[in-house]
Structures are given as C-alpha cells and as structure tokens.
Image: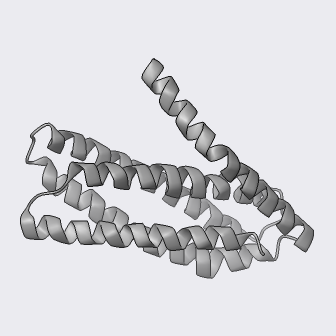
Amino acid sequence: MQARGPLMIEHRLIERMLAIGGRALARIALDDTVDPVFIDNLVDFIRMYADRTHHGKEENILFRELEKKPMSGVDRHLMEELVAEHVLGRKTTQALVEANSRYRAGDASALPDIAATLKQLVDFYPKHIEKEDKVFFPAARVYFSDQEEQELLAEYWEFDRKMIHEKYETDVERLEG
C-alpha cells in the first residue's frame, strides 16, 4: 500500500459524515431548528477524526517528511495551501462550537450562525479532499521510494495506535482540572 492509501480511506469516512451534515443543514432550513447534540457529535468527529487523526498524519508525518525533500515550487505551494486550509477548517469548527453553545443557551439568533458555519464545512471539505486525492497525493508520491512509503505507513499505524489513549487521557485531565 502507498502512504496515500490510508489517508484516502479516511477521506471516504469524512465524506460520509459531511453528507450527514448536509442533511442536517437541509433540516435546519426546513424546520428552523437543530439538534445541538448532533452538532456536538459532528464537532467531535471533525476535531478528533478529521483534524487530529487525519490531518495529524498529514501534517505531522507526511508533510514533515516532504519538507525534507527537494519539492517543486508548485508542490511546496500546494502543501502550504493545504495546511492553511486545515487551519481554516479548525477556525470554522470553533465558530460552529461557539454558535452551538449560544443556541443551547437559548439564543435563537445563533441558528443562522450554525447553518452558515455548517454550510462552510460541508462545502469546504469535499473540495479540500479532492485537491489532496487527485492533485497533491499523486504529485507527492514521486518524492518517496517504496521503502520510504513503507516507513510512512508504519508511522501512520503507530500514530493511530496512540490516538485513543491521547483522547481519553486528555478527557480525564480536563475533568480533573
């Protein structure tokens, strides 16, 4: 398997969750209401799976190793663009958290903010994923030998193995403090 394989498999799950987010967006338009628990679950998925797990592998492993390579200017610029998009995703997710908190506290004016930020996420991620799958990952493949690809895969698996422990240690520490 190539190093892009697990990342592309993760993209498919992210797309499925975004489709659910799209259906929630349609319900907001139809019913003028949202389930704040659903938004919490969506945010948890985006933060833990899409951002921490998936983007964690991209930024902390793949991009780190690509930084060591003599990349073309076009490929380096695209990688920087992808990192900037990850930051945008984090900011948009935080805005969704804030709007959901206001909505949960009874602020009905937060619903349009929830809808707007949810729409941003639902619109943003498919384009970002397509850019990675169809442009960046194939271009990045040329920078690694087969042996280096296998080393990246091994590091991905180790990264994933530690994730569940990191999540729950963080939860316990937050609740303790």
Is residue 82 in view? yes
Q: Quadrant of the C terminus?
A: top left
The quarter holding residue 101 reads top left
Q: Is residue 121 left or right of residue 11?
A: left
Along the viewing direction, whichever of 140 and 118 lies nearer the viewer:
118
Question: Which residue: 26% across, 49% down?
Answer: 37
The quarter holding residue 72 reads bottom right
Q: Quadrant of the N terminus?
A: bottom right
x, y percent for residue 41: 35, 52
x, y percent for residue 83: 57, 57
Question: Which residue: 21% across, 60% down?
Answer: 115
Question: Which residue: 67% across, 68% down?
Answer: 6
Q: Is residue 47 left or right of residue 38?
A: right
Q: How many marks?
A: 0
For residue 37, above or below residue 121: above
Is residue 64 in view? no
For residue 79, above or below residue 106: below
x, y percent for residue 43: 37, 51
For residue 104, above or below residue 66: above
Question: Which residue: 55% across, 39% down?
Answer: 167
